[in-house]
Image (cartoon, coloured by chain):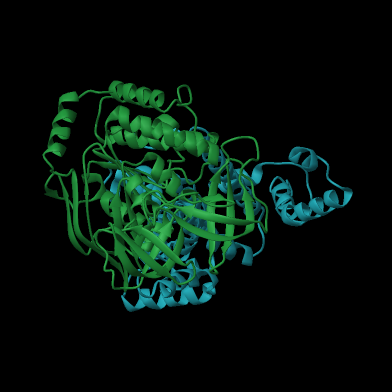
Amino acid sequence: MDEHPQKQEAMQAGAALDTPLLRISSLTKRFGGYVAIDQLSLDIHAGEFFALLGPSGCGKTTLLRMIAGFETPDSGEMLFNGENIASALPHQRPFNMMFQNYALFPHLTVEGNIAFGLKRLGMQKADIKDVVAQMLALVQLDGLGKRRPDQLSGGQRQRVALARSLALRPKILLLDEPMAALDKKLRESTQRELLELQRKLNMTFIIVTHDQDEAMTVADRIGVMDHGRLEQVAPPRQLYEAPRSRWIAEFVGDVNVFDGKVTGEENGRVTLETRDAGVIAALKPPSVDESKMLCVAIRPEKIKISQYGPVNDLGGNAAFNRLPGVVADIGYLGNATIYSVRLDTGAVLRANVSNATRLDTDSYHVGQRVVAWFVPADCMVLEQ
Amino acid sequence: MASHSVSRLSPFNVVSLALGLAFLYLPIAILMIYSFNASRLVNVWGGWSTRWYVELMNDQAMLAAAWMSLRVAAVSATAATILGTLAALALSRGERFRGRTLFSGMLYAPLVMPEVITGLSLLLLFVAVQTERGFWTVTIAHTTLTMCFVAVVVQSRLGAIDRSLEEAAMDLGCPPARAFLYVTLPIILPAVIAGWLLAFTLSLDDLVIASFTTGPGSSTLPIRIYSEVRLGVKPQINAICTLIVAAIAVVIVAASLIAKMSSVRGESAAPL
């Protein structure tokens, strides 16, 4: 598998020197009057697993297709190892793509599909045979080489598509919603295998997905897109715990959001007067215009529920936020229970309580008075 | 399940199937039987004989017409297949250009155009450009007639192909033209062959347009048969019609076998 270890080390050394493998700068693409990609800039480093995440129509697939060469940008640059490839044709780029619907050639066998690109290179027949066998072993499809795509299951077809796109050892593998057609269980195991494969081959992967769990599971970094722009590029944890905007906080995971204004500040904390959830204390945000209308966002799993709330404020006045209310609705999910609490101030707050034991010691019933509480450090103050 | 329900036809189905087949094939069956009639009179059965086939082989004019028809059919079918396939590609693969709907409508209009009008307009064209009428004028006329049929057949197949197949081929190292050659063409090949056969039989069959566009001394088979029949049906006519039916049957069976084989042996259908 590792024919050129020196080459890969050299590539990694290059990444360490901060020359990105692929640099996209101010890329713009219009379809008629519609701006699909809007002045987008992005660096992809060698050996990373990058995910483009976004709602449908956000331009993520268009961006991937431009990297592959199927669409030509209207303006902007795309540098691969410093060389502008923005107008190169797909066959001139050292990238390969795994298509959403796999795009397997129906008139060729599994072997024929995997060998397709190798034949175009003019490789010797015996070498092609070796590489095809290697690829079949890699995706665990040994013995199915003579089958045709319509004789395979969905999961097997997905593996053939993967093997075909890996056979040419692309410098970047592009994956367009590669698991959209698989069922949940198969998708999860395939995600793990894809991740292992990427580590093993030490390749650069760019995946497009609308499934945030998938992006979180596989990616080193995630770029969240909306309306043709990258809203935030960050590792999964940072994206989830420190979203840059309200939109990102709401798009990635579940969140409670309350509109409010900063009314006070002390000891590195700010207090916000919210419209319908009372006063909430939060850590002072690093870069937010505090004179504007802001919002405070809390992830449901950061919120605890109890009958009376924490006993003592150890660290001063605002060590905890306590919001009293009444349980309005209960959603039991097995591993966790989602409580909707109607606060006395009017807002409805969702808390995700982990069912850590089999006993129902921590369960509440609809109509019960409870206190929802959380620490200021778990509150994210965001601009609208 | 499926084979079970197919094997059990109700009496109603059997009767309707028999009637339908009889309606379609009884006239042809009678014609074929009478081609082996020993009697000179077409409506009197005089025992089995192959004498009309022997006489046919000596009818130089009829043989020349048959040879002319076969050549016209082969050349025009080939030209129509190339042009029709290109038109289908342009209409289904090209970007949505201005007036695309109009173009595709214009391509299909000849399907419903009365042949007399097509024939007359072509005649006027050939007269206007002062072409000597004969083999090439009939061939050109048949190409225009059959091209749209090929385009319809190929376009329906192209519409069923996923666009990303060509993109996958380009992604794997093919310039656009080769992506077509290695991926699209093998997949649409059955439709292209079917289109060629359709064009071939349509050309072989045509009387109206050929009679408008042909010149003296270059009759096609249908023209020859028609002019002979006007002087009275001769038993040789039955014989040559039987041969035509047999030839078409052979071609159709061959075509379906080719289609079946290419679908069984996937890989070898593609140039390596």
Q: Is residue B104 left or right of residue A242?
A: right
Q: Nearer the viewer, residue A33 or A245?
A: A245
Q: Tell me which residue sits at (35%, 61%) in the image.
A: A381
Q: Position of residue B78 (x, y in %)?
A: 40, 53
Residue at the image point whose x is 34% and y is 23% from the top: A129
Q: Nearer the viewer, residue A311 or A1?
A: A311
Picture quadrant of residue A98: top left
- In the picture, the quarter occupied by the C terminus of chain B is top left
Q: Is residue A142 left or right of residue A335?
A: left
Would residue A273 appear left or right of A325 to someone viewing this image? left
Q: Quadrant of residue B217?
A: bottom left
Answer with the quarter of the image where residue B106 lies: bottom left
Quarter of the figure that contains the N terminus of chain B: top right
Viewer-proximal residue, B222 or A25?
A: A25
Q: Which residue extends farthest right?
A: B11
Q: What is the total number of numbered labels drawn onto the structure image?
A: 0
| Chain assigned cyan | B
Q: What is the x, y in percent for residue A127? A: 28, 22
Q: Is residue B156 left or right of residue A230?
A: right
Can the viewer see residue A35 in this picture?
Answer: yes
Measured along the vertical axis of the image, is residue B122 above or below residue A355?
below
Chain in green colour? A
Is B183 rendered above or below residue A9?
Answer: below
Nearer to me, A273 or B5: A273
Percent from the top left, x then y, of residue B63? Answer: 50, 51
Q: Is residue B113 above or below residue A148?
A: below
x then y, percent, for residue B38? 73, 46
